[in-house]
Image (spheres, helix red, strand yellow):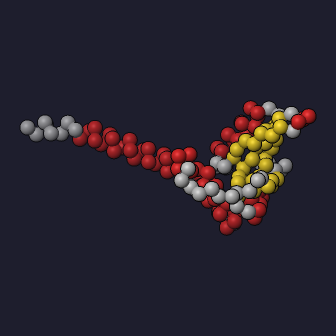
Amino acid sequence: MEGKGKWFIAPIILVVIIIAINIAYYNKKRYKVLEGDFSEEGNKKAQIETAFDMIKPFEKKNVEKINRPFAIQIASFREKNKALLLVDKLKKEGYYSAYLASKNLKEKGIWHRVRIGGFLNKEKATSVLNSLKDKYPNSFIVYQQ
């Protein structure tokens, strides 16, 4: 009689372990944007602000539209694949708000711009730009409507 009721303990333990691993993985992924050097208060605020872009798409529907007109342009490419590779690289570096903005410049053709943003004001964009200048010296702030 003692062994009959214990068969379900091992599967329960396994389920609890799987749930704990999933929670740990998604929390690490979700809060990666908050990791880094917080020596400057402005840098910390800029990194926390990018957490807005980590909201799942179905949750964004319920968030009031916020005007974030400033972005940082990192580079511009004619080849879309090169631009997408840089966007992916920036996201892996923790810049989750990196995106591609394509623009048809008529005679020059279509250019694919790699940007990070948007930011509520120029000061926040500047603090992130300063942290990017060593690695991406040609980056600059753009105002987008």
Please say if 20 is above or below 41. Answer: above
Which residue is painted at 54% across and 53% down in the image?
62
**Count the marks: how many?**
0
Nearest the camera: 105 or 17?
Answer: 105
Left or right: 86 with respect to 29?
A: right
Task: Give the residue displayed 8% in from the left and 37% down from the top.
Answer: 1
Of residues 126 and 3, which is closer to you in this image?
126
| Residue with the most extreme right position | 107
Q: Is residue 145 above or below residue 5?
A: below
Q: Does residue 54 appear to the left or right of 128 in the view shown?
A: left
Q: Residue extending furthest left?
A: 1
- Image quarter for residue 3? top left
Which one is nearer the viewer's eye here, 141 or 2?
Answer: 141
The percent coordinates of residue 69 (x first, y second) are 74, 56
Q: Which residue is drawn at 78% across and 42% down?
A: 113
One can see residue 93 in this view: no
| Depth order, front residue of 15/108 | 108
Q: Looking at the picture, does residue 39 appear above or below residue 8?
A: below
Depicted 49 relative to depicted 25: above or below: below
Image location (x, y in percent) of residue 15: 33, 41
Q: Which residue is drawn at 46% across and 48% down?
A: 24
Q: In this view, does 59 lie to the left or right of 23?
A: right
88 on left or right of 77: left
Quarter occupied by residue 89: top right
Counting from the top left corner in percent of width and height, residue 65 is at 63, 56
Whether residue 143 is visible: yes
